[in-house]
Image: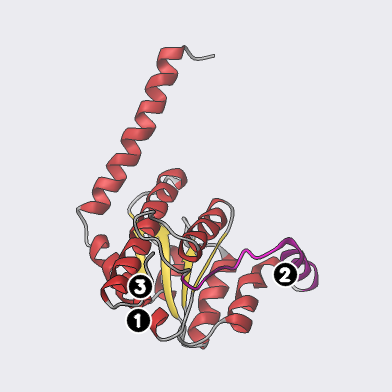
C-alpha cells in the first residue's frame, strides 16, 4: 500500500489536472461556443421547445443532473418556474423493454423520434464520441430537424460531425472530461436563465 503522503499527492494532482484542463477550456473558443449554445437553446424554449439530454454511465448521470436543474432550478438567486427539459435515461421499464425487444443502442433514438419536435434541442453527452446509443440519437435528431449539441472529449469521434454545436474537451482522460462537462452544463443553464430573464420570460419569485 502506498504511503499516506503519496496518496495525498495523488489526490492533489487530480485536482491540479482538472484545473489545468478547465484552464485550457477557458482560454479557448469553447466559451464562445457555450454562449452560442445558450442563445440557441433560449430561442428554442421561447418557441415552445424543450432541451433533451442523453448519455451513458457517468454521462447518463450528467444528463439527469442537468435536466433536473432546468426543471427545478440551478441558482437560489433565480427562483423561477421550471424550464422544459427531459433526460432520456427515463425509467428502467422503458430501458429494459427497448434493450430486450430491439437493442440498447436504439433506446435514445427511439425516444427522440417519438418525443422530439423541431423546436427542441438534443444534448448528446459522450466523453469518447463513440457511444452508439448517443450517435443514433443524434442521427434521429437530424432527421427531425432537431438542433444537436455535443458535449464531447478527445477528438470528438464520429459524434462530432453529427453536432450542430459542440463543446469538445481537449483531453483523453474520462474523469477530467466529465468534470469539464458538468461545469459546461452549469454554464449553459446559467446562460439560458440569464437570457430568459432579459427577455421577460421567467416569472421570478
Say which element carries label 1: helix
The residue shown at (56%, 57%) is 60
Q: Position of residue 31 (x, y in %)?
A: 25, 61
| Left or right relative to 182: residue 111 | right
Q: Is residue 162 magenta?
A: no
Q: Looking at the rendering, in which quadrant would you find the N terminus?
A: top right
CB under 8 Å between discs 1 and 2 = no
C-alpha span from label 2 to label 3:
28 Å
Asked if residue 204 is positioned above or below residue 145 in the image, the reply reads above
Q: Which residue is mark 3?
A: 165
Camera-nearest residue between 34 and 195: 195
Q: Which residue is mark 1?
A: 43
Q: Which residue is mark 2?
A: 103
C-alpha span from label 1 to label 2:
34 Å
Q: Residue furthest left?
A: 27
The residue shown at (42%, 60%) is 152
What residue range appears in magenta? 83-101
Amino acid at each position: 500500500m502506498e504511503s499516506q503522503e503519496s496518496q495525498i499527492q495523488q489526490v492533489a494532482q487530480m485536482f491540479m489536472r482538472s484545473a489545468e484542463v478547465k484552464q485550457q477550456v477557458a482560454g479557448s473558443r469553447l466559451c464562445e461556443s457555450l454562449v452560442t449554445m445558450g442563445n440557441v437553446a433560449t430561442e428554442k424554449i421561447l418557441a415552445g421547445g424543450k432541451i433533451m439530454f442523453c448519455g451513458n454511465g457517468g454521462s447518463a448521470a450528467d444528463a439527469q443532473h442537468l435536466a433536473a436543474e432546468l426543471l427545478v432550478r440551478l441558482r437560489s438567486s433565480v427562483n423561477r418556474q421550471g424550464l422544459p427539459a427531459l433526460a432520456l435515461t427515463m425509467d428502467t421499464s422503458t430501458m429494459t423493454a427497448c434493450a430486450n425487444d430491439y437493442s440498447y443502442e436504439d433506446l435514445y433514438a427511439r425516444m427522440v423520434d417519438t418525443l422530439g419536435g423541431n423546436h427542441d434541442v438534443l444534448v448528446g453527452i459522450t466523453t469518447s464520441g463513440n457511444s452508439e446509443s448517443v450517435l443514433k440519437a443524434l442521427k434521429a435528431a437530424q432527421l427531425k430537424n432537431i438542433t444537436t449539441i455535443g458535449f464531447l472529449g478527445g477528438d470528438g469521434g464520429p459524434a462530432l460531425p453529427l453536432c450542430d454545436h459542440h463543446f469538445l474537451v481537449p483531453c483523453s482522460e474520462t474523469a477530467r472530461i466529465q468534470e469539464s462537462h458538468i461545469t459546461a452544463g452549469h454554464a449553459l443553464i446559467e446562460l439560458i436563465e440569464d437570457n430568459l430573464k432579459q427577455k421577460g420570460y421567467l416569472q421570478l419569485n
